[in-house]
Amino acid sequence: GDPSFWRPSFVLGLLFFAALTSLAVFFWWHAWLRRTAPAEALEKQQIVVLLAAWLAVIGWITTSWTSIRNSVKQHTVNTLLQSRLSATYMERADRVNKFFGAYEARHPLKTRDPDADPTQGIAGDDEEALRYILNYFEYIAIGVRHGDLHEAMLRASLRSILTKTTFYSRDWIERRVGGGPTLAPNPLLYRNLRWLYLRW
């Protein structure tokens, strides 16, 4: 299945909903039982015990959700800081930005062919830099998809550069996904990045 479905926060949300629903069903059932068969209704002490157990479960779910949320946010901040403090990342990102910046300068937006390949002719250090940046974005996408990184924070900080770089690299990626005369097909290449690009 889709790993994004099994995010810890989503699973805890389901558990929280199930706990509240079962609590509501219990009170409805007990109220119905007291009207139809008062002798079989639970005593107050039993209700207090059951209510305490339910509240303990709901409290545990809430505490776990808060802990996971804070942990994911901290991990996201660390990931963003490490990329900004990495000389290698900054050098590769700068090289990719210059390459696509030169493409934009040669092809103004009003006269740009939407079907043109911005990565046409990319090679050497420029291509290696592009591969490095796309691999980093794939790592980011995996973290978002599995719930290990905070999507809203990443979207606010990386959405523009991630979507622009992925859009400009679409033909370069498709050639490697589909294969060619000198490339073996790799349908799983940047699978998570392609998912995140469409999502954002």
Image (spheres, rainbow, N blue to C red):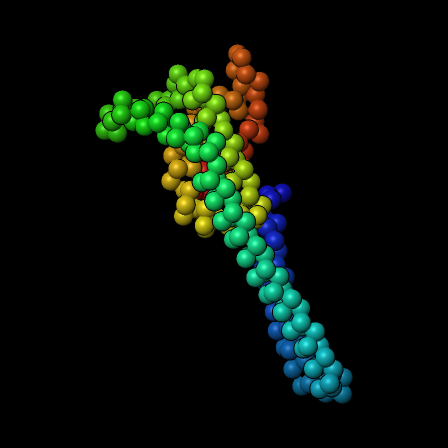
Vertical relation: 99 (above or below) 4: above
Question: Which quadrant: the N terminus?
Answer: top right
Q: Residue at x 62, y 61 (%)?
A: 64
Q: Viewed as shown, does residue 39 lie left or right of 197?
A: right
Task: Determine if residue 103 is in view.
Answer: yes
Q: In the displayed orientation, state which residue is furthest to the left.
A: 110
Q: Give the image quarter of residue 52.
A: bottom right
Q: Position of residue 67 (x, y in %)?
A: 59, 60
Q: Residue at x 71, y 86 (%)?
A: 44
Q: Position of residue 128 (x, y in %)?
A: 48, 23
Vertical relation: 82 (above or below) 190: below
Q: Viewed as shown, does residue 26 lie left or right of 120?
A: right
Q: In the displayed orientation, state which residue is furthest to the right.
A: 40
Vertical relation: 28 (above or below) 18: below
Q: Residue at x 64, y 78 (%)?
A: 27
Decide which of 101, 21 is in the foreground and name it. Answer: 101
Q: Viewed as shown, does residue 48 lie left or right of 65?
A: right
